[in-house]
Amino acid sequence: MQPVLADSVKLTDDGVLILDRREFPFERTWVLCRTVEDVARAIEDMVTQSSGPYFAVLYGMVLKARTLEDKPFAQARAELARTAQLLENTRRTNNALRKATKIVLDAVDEAQDVRSALQGAHNGDAVYRAKSQALGEHTANLLPDEATVLTHCWADLYLTETVRAAQQQGKKLRFFCTETRPYLQGARLTAETLIEMGVDTTLITDGMGAAVLQSGEVDALVTAADRVTMDGHVVNKVGTLGLAVAAHAFGVPFHALVQAPDRQAPTAADVPIEHRDGAEVLQVLGRPSATPRVKGLYPAFDVTPPRFVTDVVTDRGVFGAGELDKYYEGEQR
């Protein structure tokens, strides 16, 4: 069965339809974005997260291209480039958005026709899914036949493809997943999807991770990575660092999942860390959870140093955090 969240961004004649992950699974509401500005706002407002913005950007570029078909190519191409920058700036920590705009612009440049943006978007969709499938198979290979896994936040297609591959290998998985404050992606997205896939799933609060790792029940900590630097730093949803340190302390391997390390980020200093409005941590699902007289702090991502990372799993295989250059062996810059 295809999990609902595996196909949560769709291009239609009217615009881009995005499943509102802020409401899922209690409500399954689709937000229609008629313009690229609507798409950008939806990404910024967390209507979609994880790989969702990647697909939203692909199809947001198509929306803009539709409005440029009657303009001279040079003018249309310049406007499409400005649109790419707008979309990339919606969530700057994750470099997947840059990849999405590039694959669309490459298709446009090759054809010298903005109408080719649609083919570029289809290419980007297919490539992402194929790479996620390969990554999932490599991750499943690392897990024992009866594995208990701790995960954090929502790893999206990386998670679903890992589970699918493990099930095809006859492995039996059990998951602990954190709530992931303040949007509860782990509680609402991860837990629901794992249950859809028939996986034994236990939810814990964010503060319980170290205790669960200490219990000896967990075989592996497995998370996605929004970005991995060439020197092995893992940038992911805030809270990943604490779990990685605890996993290291209790001898549990930490497998960080990313399609590819980022050549444009040699070190952690090259990755912008998004800070969201601190007021977001003062509420849960729209309801206040603290007095409004207190201030909130919300760095949306943290950075795990390579000494706490057992390995980085990519679409091309598994690499130690100190050997990520091997991913690009044989390629020209």
Image (tube, helix red, strand yellow):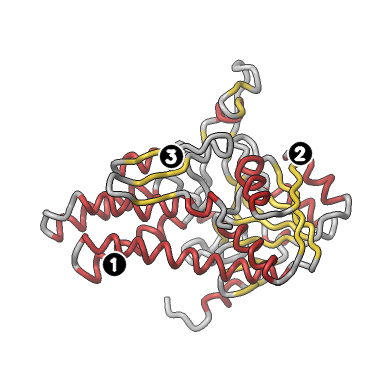
Point out which mark residue 107 bears.
1
Residue placed at 60% from the left, 44% from the top?
A: 189
The disc labelled 3 sits on which kind of residue? Trp
Residue placed at 43% from the left, 39% from the top?
A: 30
In three-dimensional space, the C-alpha distance between marks 1 and 2, rounded to whole angstroms, equals 46 Å
> Is residue 161 rendered to the left or right of residue 44?
right
User: Label 2, on which residue?
Assistant: 207
Q: Are marks 1 and 2 in contact (CB under 8 Å)?
A: no
Which numbered disc, 3 or 2, marks the residue that appears first in the sequence?
Answer: 3
The disc labelled 2 sits on which kind of residue? Gly
Q: Residues within 10 Å of mark 1 (few under 14, many from 20)?
A: many
In three-dimensional space, the C-alpha distance between marks 3 and 2, rounded to whole angstroms, equals 32 Å
The disc labelled 1 sits on which kind of residue? Ala
Instruction: Work out whether 311 lies above or below 53.
Output: below
In three-dimensional space, the C-alpha distance between marks 3 and 1, rounded to whole angstroms, equals 29 Å
User: Label 3, on which residue?
Assistant: 30
Disc 3, SS:
strand
Label 3 vs label 2, nearer the camera: 3
